Image (cartoon, rainbow, N blue to C red):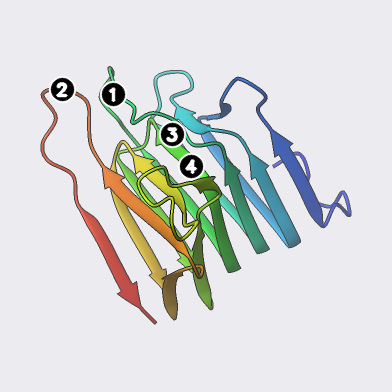
Amino acid sequence: SGLDGSGIDRLYLAGVNQPVRFEGAVTLDLPRALQIETAQIEVGPLGGVAPQVRLSAGYLLLNGAIVDPFLATEPASGTLELSGGWIDLLGGLALRGAAAVTLDSATDIRLVGTVPDATDGEFGRVRGTLDSQGDLSLRASQVYTATGASFRLNAAGAPGEAGRTIRIEGL
């Protein structure tokens, strides 16, 4: 990528009221941290070539606002690979455009709800969600929710696409 050799070791990307979008072949490898704050991460083709997006960092934080479950309207293609030494998913996030999404952690993937759960007023639980348009794979030593949180994983394609799968693998 254009950041190779730049000395940048951490990066913050934010989409305020819009998705963070990657097009074509994108590889980003940061030694320390990558934080993406948005309700949606989108990948798309560039010049007719399916997206191949690989984002990696020592620590990966995906921080989203709870969004209504999305309905994909276009078929997904290509891949989105998110990897880190540790991965935190906060709130709600939709991943669009990739037929295959992989979250790969050398240690843990922690799922942290951030929005009060209206169905559980007595205990003050919070909820979170990860919606993927493509097949979703989580690979880590441990995948768990934070204390007092519920977290929904969802893989649903566009109308007419074959059913999607969720796979959780241990190291």
Q: Nearer the viewer, mark 3 or mark 2?
A: 2
Amino acid tagged 3: Pro
Q: Are marks 2 and 1 in contact (CB under 8 Å)?
A: yes
Q: Earlier in the sequence, mark 3 or mark 1?
A: 3
Q: Position of residue 1 (x, y in %)?
A: 69, 42
Amino acid tagged 1: Leu
Name the one closer to the observer, 142 or 106. Answer: 142
Amino acid tagged 4: Gly
Q: Nearer the viewer, mark 2 or mark 1?
A: 1
Q: Earlier in the sequence, mark 2 or mark 1?
A: 1
* Residue at screen point 28% across, 45% down: 154
Give the Cα distance between marks 2 and 4.
Answer: 22 Å
Name the one closer to the observer, 52 or 112. Answer: 112
Q: Earlier in the sequence, mark 2 or mark 4?
A: 4
Q: Position of residue 76 (x, y in %)?
A: 30, 30
Q: Which mark is residue 139?
A: none
- Answer left or right for 149 relative to 16: left
The single residue placed furthest to the right in the displayed view is 7
Q: Earlier in the sequence, mark 3 or mark 4?
A: 3
Which residue in the structure is indicated by mark 2?
Answer: 159
Give the Cα distance between marks 3 and 1.
Answer: 20 Å
Which residue in the structure is indicated by mark 1?
Answer: 71
Q: Which mark is residue 92?
A: 4
Element type at marker 4? strand
Decide: few, some or many residues near mark 2? Use Cα within 10 Å; few <14, some 14-19, many ≥20: few
- Answer left or right for 71 relative to 61: left
Q: Are marks 2 and 4 in contact (CB under 8 Å)?
A: no
Name the one closer to the observer, 55 or 24. Answer: 55
